[in-house]
Image (tube, coloured by chain):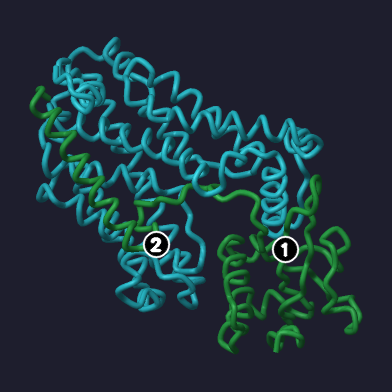
């Protein structure tokens, strides 16, 4: 490479940067592989994730109770073991505002009736936030009950 | 040498005064092999997951804003696209086909990304490989030939890596403010990741560094501050004399993130190791004469 080509190289990088800026400006900051949102750019915000617990042995009247995570009823179901991507699952749950029949049934499809078998699994939202000057609270909110027969939304969400 | 600021940066990135060496050409093909491997690996991971799991479009990204990504969820369309990408990457690697073929790879790579990640998550761990494919696409088209393409591709990859880290520093400053390094923010992230791990694996146990951070806001703040400062100086990779030192700090930062946040950046770290150090000097010590096949595939 000679000097003039080095100069041309910088010009081409400049053009790529212009294209980069134009694409992210018109696509809410994301046009893969271009992005203006690095990880962890917004700190301190409350978050919502999702998890599944095995509530087979829990009485029906305790199924929908919101509790701190460390007091959760039932053991965690490892979603990875059933071929479900935790990040996708978590985003599907946390970013869904309206739980239509199609969305509720998608949860059942995601885990599969054959995997649920005779168990009862609870899909829950998990909320975390900073409290006061020196602590973080994490709460688990039951959302959808999965059984071999189907998926059932928390009655308070209807 | 051009004395303008961009001329000096270009001089450090593309090193126009230095003759191309055998070691450099071999290293360039090894780097291309690394990018080709991850490109093929990612497209197949995305395609198989799409075929098995994608149900409904939750979040349209990129080109998915202009078409229905769910059309690609069934009938093995995504695996078929992955097969096409694989074939094209092999052609590109051996410099068979037109100069713009890498652009087609980039387009299909983007397409598979927006199909796979229409489920709500916007991951960034594949961005560096995507940017590298872009640099190969531009390099193959506008800087073809053994004297120009390796220099442009590696120089532009280094430019975008450095820019990306420094931009990340300013994003945090703008997105949160000067108190971004408040240790309680790290507590919140650790608790968030702990839920992901508990959900993924069924159990979670904090490691030593996480316990240390969770026991003291001061320790947590220092951890964040070191990482944040390291991002700020990312652009110093553009200067070839500083590059190995900056790269080492960035690699250490990624190991720190892995320890504290349980997030691995394998492709990122391997790429940093590859482009951040002058490996061609080592190769030049052992290989003096270029193998006859090398010129044909550079």
- Could you tell me residue B246's position as x and y percent? 44, 23
Which numbered marker is on residue B225? Answer: none
Can you give x and y, in whole percent of width and height, for residue B20 in the image? Answer: 16, 19
Q: What residue did someone put label 1 on?
A: A127
Residue B25 appears in the figure = no
Instruction: Please tell me how crowded label 1 is: few (under 14), some (14-19), or many (20+) other residues with Cα within 10 Å.
Output: many
Chain B is which colour? cyan
Place residue A31 in its image quadrant: bottom left
Q: Nearer the viewer, residue B129 or B16?
A: B16
Identify the residue at the far top of this view.
Answer: B285
Report the front residue among B192 and A136. Answer: A136
* Residue A28: mark: 2
Instruction: Report helix, strand or loop for mark 2.
Output: loop
B144 relative position to A106: left or right: left
For label 1, the SS is: strand
Q: Is residue A103 above or below residue B154?
A: below
Query: Camera-side residue: A82 or A39?
Result: A39
Is tag 2's residue or tag 1's residue first in the polypeptide sequence?
Answer: 2
| Closer to us: A20 or A54 | A20
Are the residues at dot 2 and dot 1 in contact (C-beta closer than 8 Å)?
no
Q: What residue appears at the point 36 percent right and 68 percent down from the top-left corner? A: B78
Using the rendered view, name the quadrant where residue A63 is placed.
bottom right
Please state, as top left, top right, bottom left or bottom right, where the C terminus of chain B lies in the image.
top left
Q: What chain is colored green?
A: A
**Dot 1 falls on which chain?**
A
Q: Residue at x 11, y 50 (%)?
A: B97
Left or right, B237 with respect to B21, comes to right
* Residue B296 in view of the camera: yes
Q: Chain of mark 2?
A: A
Residue at 64%, 55% in the rendered image:
A45
């Amino acid at each position: 490479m000679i000097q003039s080509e080095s100069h041309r190289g910088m010009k081409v990088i400049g053009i790529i940067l212009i294209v980069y800026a134009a694409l992210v400006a018109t696509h809410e900051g994301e046009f893969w592989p271009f992005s203006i949102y690095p990880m962890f750019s917004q700190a301190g915000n409350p978050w919502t994730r999702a998890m599944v617990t095995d509530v087979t042995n829990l009485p029906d009247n305790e199924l929908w109770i919101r509790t701190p995570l460390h007091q959760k009823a039932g053991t965690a179901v490892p979603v990875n073991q059933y071929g479900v991507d935790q990040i996708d699952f978590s985003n599907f749950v946390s970013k869904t505002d309206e739980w239509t029949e199609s969305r509720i049934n998608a949860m059942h499809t995601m885990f599969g009736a054959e995997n649920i078998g005779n168990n009862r699994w609870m899909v829950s939202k998990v909320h975390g936030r900073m409290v006061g000057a020196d602590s973080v609270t994490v709460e688990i909110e039951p959302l959808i009950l999965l059984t071999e027969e189907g998926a059932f939304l928390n009655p308070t969400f209807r | 040498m051009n004395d303008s600021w961009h001329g000096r940066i270009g001089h450090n990135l593309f090193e126009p005064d230095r003759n191309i060496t055998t070691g450099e050409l071999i290293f360039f093909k090894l780097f291309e092999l690394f990018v080709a491997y991850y490109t093929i690996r990612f497209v197949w991971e995305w395609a198989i997951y799409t075929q098995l799991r994608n149900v409904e479009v939750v979040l349209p990204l990129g080109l998915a804003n202009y078409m229905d990504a769910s059309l690609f969820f069934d009938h093995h369309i995504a695996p078929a696209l992955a097969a096409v990408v694989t074939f094209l990457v092999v052609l590109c690697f051996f410099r068979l086909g037109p100069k713009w073929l890498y652009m087609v790879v980039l387009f299909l790579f983007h397409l598979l990304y927006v199909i796979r990640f229409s489920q709500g998550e916007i991951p960034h761990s594949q961005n560096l490989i995507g940017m590298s494919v872009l640099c190969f696409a531009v390099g193959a088209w506008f800087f073809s030939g053994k004297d120009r393409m390796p220099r442009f591709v590696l120089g532009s990859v280094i430019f975008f890596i450095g820019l990306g880290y420094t931009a990340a520093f300013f994003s945090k400053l703008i997105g949160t403010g000067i108190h971004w390094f408040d240790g309680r923010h790290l507590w919140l992230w650790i608790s968030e990741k702990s839920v992901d791990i508990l959900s993924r694996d069924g159990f979670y146990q904090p490691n030593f560094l996480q316990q240390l951070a969770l026991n003291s806001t001061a320790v947590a703040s220092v951890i964040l501050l070191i990482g944040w400062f390291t991002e700020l100086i990312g652009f110093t990779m553009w200067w070839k004399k500083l590059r190995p030192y900056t790269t080492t700090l960035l690699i250490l930062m990624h190991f720190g993130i892995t320890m504290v946040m349980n997030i691995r950046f394998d492709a990122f770290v391997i790429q940093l190791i590859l482009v951040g150090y002058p490996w061609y000097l080592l190769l030049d010590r052992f290989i003096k004469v270029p193998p006859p096949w090398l010129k044909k595939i550079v």
